[in-house]
Image: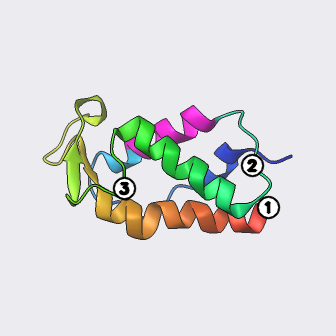
Amino acid sequence: MKQVNDLFDPPPDRWGLRGDPWVWQAMRDHLTGTYLPPTLGECEAMLYAAFNRIVGVDLATELEPMVFRREFAHGGMSSGQIHLDTWRAELLPLLVDRARTKI
């Protein structure tokens, strides 16, 4: 069986803000050792739930385009800023697309 953390390789070529790569890595670490669920819907739900746990934001209800999280601040002007719009439009859909090819 394939593991969810396999979906995170390679990382995307571009990010929204400086906190995004740190969230990507935190999600990968959080899901390491977890097997891909049998359906794409379950996998998508797992990815969104992991994001919500790690960032503390529900993408379905949060209206702000970005949030700050100190734990993802590692230097730079937008350090610690997570671009929720990029996660909604690009990063989580990328992971779901990768899952589609593995399930």
Residue 45 position within the rendered picture, expressed as x and y whole percent measured from the top left: 58, 53
Span shown in magenta: 22-31
Q: CA distance from mark 3 to mark 2?
A: 22 Å
Q: Residues within 10 Å of mark 1 (few under 14, many from 20)?
A: few
- The nearer-to-camera label among 1 and 3 is 3
- The residue at the point 56 percent across, 33 percent down is 29
Tell me, yes or no, whether the highlighted magenta stretch contains residue 8: no
User: Could you say which quadrant of the image residue 76 lies in?
Assistant: top left
Residue at 43% in and 37% down: 53
Q: Is residue 82 visible?
A: yes
Query: Along the line of sight, which residue is nearer the eye, 74 or 49?
Result: 49
Give the residue at x 22% y 60%: 63
Precedes in sequence: disc 1 or disc 3? 3
Task: In the rendered view, tell whether residue 89 sits above or below residue 4.
Answer: below
Residue 1 percent across, percent down from the top left: 86, 46
Q: Are marks 1 and 2 in contact (CB under 8 Å)?
A: yes
Q: Which mark is residue 36?
A: 2
Residue highlighted by disc 1: 103
- From mark 1 to mark 2, how far is it between C-alphas? 7 Å
